[in-house]
Image: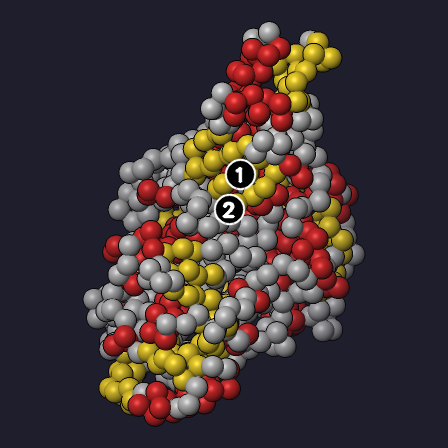
Amino acid sequence: MGDFSLIGKSMKRIDTPLKATGQARFSSDLMLPRMLIGKVLRSPHAHAKILEIDISKAEKLQGVKAVITAKDTCADKWGVFRYTQDQQFLPTDKVRYVGEEVAAVAAVDEDTAIQALKLIKVEYEELPAVFDIKSALESGAPLIHQDHPGNINIHVNIDVGDVVKGFGESYCVREDTFTAPEDSYFQGEPYAVVAQYDHTGSLEIWMPNAGPHLKAKPLSNVLKIPLNKVRVRKIAIGGAFGGRSEISPADVICAFLARKSQRPVKLVYTREENSIATRQAHSMIATIKTGVNKEGRVISRDITCHMDGGAYSSTGPIAVSVPFLCMEQAYQMENVRYNGYRVFTNKPIRGMFRTHGRAFACGVDLQLDMIGQELGINPLEMRLRNARKVGEFTPTKSYVASCGMTETILKAGEKAGWNEKWGKLPPYHGIGIGCNSVQTGFPMGIRGGSQAFIKFNEEGGITVITGIVDNGQGNDNMIVQIAAEELGLGVCDVQLINADTEVTPSDPGSYSMCETFIGGNAVRLAAQDAKNKLLKIASEALKASPDELTVKDRKIYIEKSPNKSISLSKIIRIALSRNESISGEGSYWPKVDSKREWVENPSGQLSETFSFGTVITEVKVDPETGKVDVLEVTAAQDVGYALNPKVIEGQFEGGIAMGGQGGMLSEYILWYNGRVLNPDQLDYMVPLAIDMPRINNIIVETIDPNGPYGAKEAGMSIAMSAAQAYCGAICNAIGVNIKEFPLTPDKILNAIEKKVKGEQNP
């Protein structure tokens, strides 16, 4: 790579001071004149008809300024795709899960709003409900939606090669079923929305979001106002992890309350509401059958996966597909069949998740360990023999232009001391490995590409205008870093305007891991466009061709004669005196197959590039208590090129916390008849800083041919690989393969007891 001033260097993020000092403002921090407080009335039933809603007493309560029900909204139904439009933001006919929104109020203070909710009387007729996948699929089970027989929401079928023939040619065939319950996003920031209208009837709204443009359009649709009258404003966001990518009932309810009251309204969810009324991650049952040859290379694989999608479709087609896609990207296989089913139940809605598919991903990797054990091949070698290589096509026909999977396995293995530890550790000590891959962007229709604008001020500083949003992963810093590098500026010379639909151009949002690759490319192209204009004017002043010039340290100089230079500010003033403004425009559209569709045509280039990650975990298990001590974790990921290594290491560590330490040891939702029993921070066990093990971070660079400076996604592959590695390490430590996740002490003790009694799992 070139000699960069900022790119490839570890630097403090531009938002660090504000967040470290508590000055960053989130939606719940906003205070507007005459602002009201919103509250939502929720269903106490998992499944019931709404017979009547009486809001008359609530409306008469002093201090109440607006009460809304479904009658105040339209009957439109929301869905990410046209064929999944099934959710009303306030239902007209029936409720489908405990906690579903039924009505809402806006009042002068919180106490009054809560009192008003108690005055709303709703008459229900309870209906039979189903709370798990098996019950929902039984013959005669109550239907959650009448137009979905058998409660099947989405069925994704992928069939490549000849699976039956492949199994017939396999030396070893194994079939296992793996399960995992729901888990929560549990973002640090509970969901909060602030909405107000101006005198023209335009909506101004702030909320946590992974893409402001992805919020603005559905708000325009449901409010029946033009898109140019919906302004989603930038605000600090406390995490997303896949759960804030689509419109939320809170957004719509707050907007309707503001319109009816003609005053600003703030709606803040409690921690309990945040757990039940925003997205959750799917529970899952995955049956995996794999056939390999004598060398352990996968010949054939057949997977049937059932996912509990809750009451509505949400991102259903994507959610059903992604676990399979991550697997096919990570591992070679000649023949593969996949049947993925998303099933309706009377539970809250499920969406995409950073560590999506625990049962699927951990099942694939743990089964490789089992097969390797039968063949006498250790887990690291099993992965090396099946690892995806650069220049290959995935089974569903995505070309892999850059791939460091093998390098991540080898480097992680060397750092973790795999060869010295595998099979040589003391009793109840174990080591495990996990590998995974993540797409960097996928077809998203007209919002699949990103645009960026750059303008100079007369002193030589710039303003970057882009739709890119930062959910905490460092996207703001990435934008500034790229623009400053291209234009020879310092970070302090860059002003950023982003994630505001009124002033910023279209962008796919921080979704499908695409912002660095797609948005970053757009920013770089905009900077290059502006730079070309600068060089053209500077070439006249310096009497040299633009090709001979370089931009650095706020100056343009002749590369071979550095003493001959001109300041950027002078170039800008020359341009202004000639009635020429210096600005830049860039756009980037990923090279994907626009005809690829999740259900009807799951074939073609899914993403322009893919990331690849490996995690190795070493653990010690207490056979008396089942407690797991994680001794060391080694994480290696092919990130293309590390734009800011320190930020990437932070993403690795966050992925390990979510996918491994939390996702495989402690995080799961407890239920009773569709009601969440552990919705708060006391009972839902998110790992704390003191719980985290020693982590070794290894950044592998393959220089993607199309990424900005060769960069691509960083962090997601680690999150999923961590879950797999934790699983493998614990099973290795106790000598039993557990197929129900997460691996909590009770399951570990039960497995050890069965082993002692001679009932070891196969």
- Looking at the rendered structure, the kind of residue marked 2 is Asn
In this rendering, is residue 665 above or below 507? below
In this rendering, is residue 580 above or below 202? above
Q: Position of 579 compared to 154: left or right?
A: right
Residue at 28 percent of width and 54 percent of height = 226
State the image coordinates of residue 186 (x, y, percent, origin top left): 56, 66
Q: Position of 525 compared to 700: left or right?
A: left
CA–CA distance in space, label 2 to label 1: 8 Å
- Looking at the rendered structure, the kind of residue marked 1 is Val
Q: Which residue is mark 2?
A: 498
In this rendering, is residue 271 above or below 508? below
Residue at 62 percent of width and 70 percent of height = 685
Q: Mark 2 or mark 1, which has the lower sequence index? A: 1
* Front-most of residues 649 and 548: 548
In this rendering, is residue 548 above or below 526? above
Name the secondary structure under disc 2: strand
- Give the quarter of the image for residue 441: top left
In the picture, the disc for residue 464 is 1
- Give the quarter of the image for residue 26: bottom right
Q: Is residue 602 visible?
A: no
Residue at 42 percent of width and 50 percent of height = 501
State the image coordinates of residue 355 (x, y, percent, origin top left): 53, 55
Residue at 73 percent of width and 50 percent of height = 695
Quadrant placement of the N terminus = top right
State the image coordinates of residue 565 (x, y, percent, origin top left): 68, 15
Asked if labels 1 and 2 touch by Cβ distance under 8 angstroms, the answer is yes
State the image coordinates of residue 523 (x, y, percent, origin top left): 51, 34
* Front-most of residues 719 and 174: 719
Q: Is residue 229 visible?
A: yes
In the picture, the disc for residue 368 is none
What colour scheme governs how the chains and residues are painted in the rendered image of this protein? Answer: secondary structure
Q: Residue furthest left?
A: 147
